[in-house]
Image (cartoon, rainbow, N blue to C red):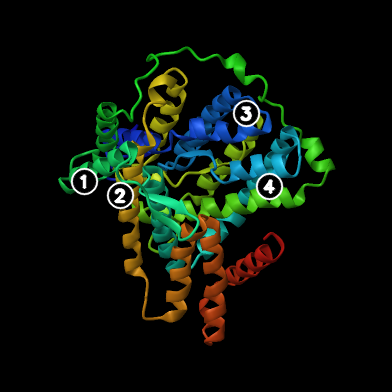
């Protein structure tokens, strides 16, 4: 393990990596059930997509662990799977096989852009102030997800959002879990977030929120995977010219991934003194290969998950944590009844607390310089308010070079930042 993952150099131990990996898995295990529930609306069998989700997530996360030695977990992207199911297949009437072909093509383009180092150049071109803002914005974004999953924040047609019913058992359980985990963190208990998830799940059993498992062990039926495995239609996607669809898959995944890598890396102190991510190209290549293989397995775009921040907060620093996540995904094939009982109310507190940890990155922003302050603020605010990491990045990339140029400080901006800012303007103009 030391030769593969350099644990001592990273200042970690295998015990911390184990806890960190399990914490990340617990906070993102919902994807095993949520992704199939969305994608199955296209006519794809639920169980087949669930198996595809597990294998795609395990393979991509393992690649990230072994190629890049980072504790970043990957899985089919939320938002992208909804776009796949409801916009491409549902609204446009595209067969799901053809839509998977479009995902495959976007993944191949990702591989080309990664090997040509274009994606790494994009990460390096992100201004330091926006890197800090992206990390803080992601913190608010995942905190909002946690508060919503807990039922503390709910939708309201009059005020957009409102306080939920705190007397609901699930919401009350999430509040108990939030307080319990916060105390564990305050006491510096090792693996506090994972311990908090497990204890909250246990308490939920007495409150009627955590359901009793329907058994503990079940042999997987891999024959159920056959209806989607390798059924993508690349030729049809090329023939029908789905370039706009392919571009959306490409665009959203690219900048969601870039944002997640920067945000979680800032939290884990993975960036070097120049603000660059070592081995960024290997991390991006893992992400790209994940999308290509995921489409073959039978699931939409695979991307790096922001929930990796929970594992980093629990102490994960190397790819060993990723190996744990990948192993947990594969083991879930045999323990689906157990994985299924962890309620959202038990994992929601972890997301809120990780958000609290990540917001501290705003400390490094020069708030007295408005050419830095406004792009940073809108980057942070737009992520939770628009429910999109990519949109927050886009607004920051547009405003930052514009303000610098308008105030006579255009030379402070990397040339690629101008190019990306222009591309984001075109994206809003033509892909609204």
Dot 2, crowdedness within 10 Å: few (<14), some or many (≥20)?
many
How far is the residue under mark 2 from the one under mark 3? 34 Å
Q: Taking 407 as reference, is 416 above or below it? A: above
Q: Are marks 1 and 2 in contact (CB under 8 Å)?
A: yes
**SS at circle 1:** helix
Residue on which disc 4 sits: 109
| Label 2 sits on residue | 353
What's the distance in space between the residues labelled 4 and 2, CA to CA? 36 Å
Task: Tell me the distance, in whole angstroms, between the alpha carbons under discs 1 and 4.
Answer: 42 Å
* Percent x, y of residue 293: 62, 33
Residue 297 numbered mark, or none: 3
Precedes in sequence: disc 1 or disc 3: 1
Q: Earlier in the sequence, mark 2 or mark 3?
A: 3
Q: Residue at 51% of width from left, 34% of height from top?
A: 34
- Picture residue at 37% right of the left edge, 41% below the top: 318
Q: How many marks?
A: 4
Left or right of residue 244, residue 411 in this image: left
Q: Position of residue 394 (x, y in %)?
A: 56, 64
What residue do we see at 37% from left, 15% from top? Answer: 216
Q: Is 205 in front, or is 88? A: 205
The x, y position of residue 49, in whole percent, is 59, 27
On the rendered structure, is 100 left or right of 317?
Answer: right
Residue under label 1, please give it: 185
Query: In the orientation shown, which residue stands out farthest toward the left?
Result: 187
Q: Closer to the observer: label 2 or label 3? A: 2
Q: Closer to the N terminus: mark 4 or mark 3?
A: 4
């Amino acid at each position: 393990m030391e030769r593969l993952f350099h644990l001592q150099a990273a200042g970690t131990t295998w015990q911390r990596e184990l806890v960190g990996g399990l914490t990340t898995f617990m906070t993102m295990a919902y994807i095993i059930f949520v992704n199939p529930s969305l994608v199955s609306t296209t006519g794809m069998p639920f169980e087949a997509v669930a198996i595809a989700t597990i294998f795609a997530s395990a393979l991509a996360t393992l690649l990230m662990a072994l190629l890049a030695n980072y504790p970043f977990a990957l899985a089919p992207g939320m938002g992208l799977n909804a776009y796949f199911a409801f916009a491409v297949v549902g609204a446009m009437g595209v067969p799901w096989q053809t839509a998977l072909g479009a995902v495959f093509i976007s993944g191949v383009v990702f591989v080309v852009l990664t090997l040509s180092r274009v994606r790494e150049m994009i990460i390096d071109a992100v201004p330091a102030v926006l890197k800090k803002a992206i990390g803080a914005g992601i913190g608010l974004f995942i905190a909002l997800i946690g508060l919503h999953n807990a039922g503390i924040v709910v939708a309201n047609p009059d005020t957009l959002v409102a306080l939920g019913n705190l007397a609901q058992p699930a919401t009350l359980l999430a509040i108990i879990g939030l307080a319990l985990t916060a105390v564990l963190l305050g006491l510096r208990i090792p693996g506090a977030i994972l311990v908090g998830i497990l204890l909250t799940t246990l308490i939920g059993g007495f409150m009627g929120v955590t359901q009793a498992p329907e058994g503990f062990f079940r042999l997987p039926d891999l024959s159920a995977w056959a209806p989607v495995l390798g059924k993508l239609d690349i030729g049809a996607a090329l023939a029908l010219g789905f370039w706009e669809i392919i571009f959306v898959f490409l665009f959203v995944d690219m900048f969601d991934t870039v944002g997640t890598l920067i945000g979680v890396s800032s939290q884990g102190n993975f960036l070097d003194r120049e603000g660059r991510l070592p081995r960024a190209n290997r991390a991006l290549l893992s992400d790209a290969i994940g999308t290509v293989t995921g489409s073959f397995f039978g699931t939409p775009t695979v991307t790096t998950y922001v929930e990796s921040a929970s594992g980093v907060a629990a102490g994960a620093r190397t790819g060993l944590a990723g190996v744990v996540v990948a192993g947990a995904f594969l083991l879930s094939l045999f323990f689906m009844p157990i994985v299924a009982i962890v309620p959202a109310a038990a994992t929601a507190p972890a997301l809120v607390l990780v958000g609290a940890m990540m917001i501290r990155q705003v400390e490094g922003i020069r708030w007295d310089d408005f050419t830095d302050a406004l792009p940073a603020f809108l980057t942070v605010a737009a992520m939770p308010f628009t429910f999109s990491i990519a949109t927050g990045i886009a607004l920051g990339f547009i405003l930052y070079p514009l303000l610098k140029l308008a105030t006579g400080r255009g030379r402070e901006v990397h040339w690629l930042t101008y190019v990306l800012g222009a591309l984001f303007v075109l994206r809003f103009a033509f892909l609204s």
